Image (cartoon, rainbow, N blue to C red):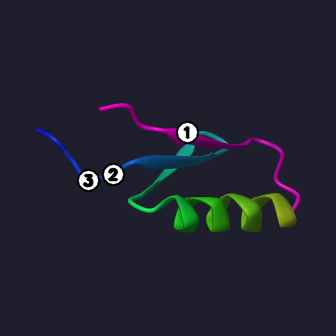
């Protein structure tokens, strides 16, 4: 099954999915601003 999700923001092993890069980047930046250090923005292939 193909989904429309294109980005994942991981925070300490917990995932949040996004369709738009700008939304994912905003979430990523917010977590970094809160001083979380296990934050990763991943692009979904496919």
- Residue at 39%, 48% (x, y): give it: 6
The residue wearing badge 3 is 4
Q: Categorize mark 1 by other alpha carbons within 10 Å: few (<14), some (14-19), many (20+).
A: some
Placement of 6 over or under 26, stated as above or below = above
Question: How many numbered circles does the render carry?
Answer: 3
- Tell me residue 22's x, y (percent): 56, 66
From this viewpoint, which residue is outermost toward the left? 1
Quarter of the image for residue 1 reads: top left
Point 83% across, 45% down: residue:
37
Q: Quick check: is 43 in the magenta stretch?
A: yes
In the rendered structure, which segment of residues is drawn in magenta? 34-46
Secondary element at image label 3: loop
Label 1 SS: strand
Q: Using a 10 Å C-alpha cutoff, classify the residue at mark 3 as few (fewer than 14 neighbours), some (14 to 19) or many (20 or more).
A: few
Residue 5 numbered tag: 2
Q: Is residue 37 magenta?
A: yes
Crowding at mark 2 (Cα within 10 Å: few <14, some 14-19, many 20+) = some
Q: Which mark is residue 42?
A: 1
Q: Quadrant of residue 2 in the image? A: top left
The answer to whether marks 2 and 3 mark residues whose Cβ atoms lie closer than 8 Å is: yes
Observer-nearest of 9 and 36: 9
Q: Position of residue 36 (x, y in %)?
A: 82, 53
- Per the image, label 2 sits on a secondary structure element best described as loop
Question: Which residue is located at x 74 percent, y 68 percent?
Answer: 30
């Amino acid at each position: 099954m193909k989904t429309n999700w294109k980005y994942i923001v991981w925070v300490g092993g917990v995932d949040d999915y996004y369709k738009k890069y700008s939304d994912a980047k905003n979430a990523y930046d917010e977590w970094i601003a809160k001083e979380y250090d296990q934050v990763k923005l991943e692009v979904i292939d496919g």
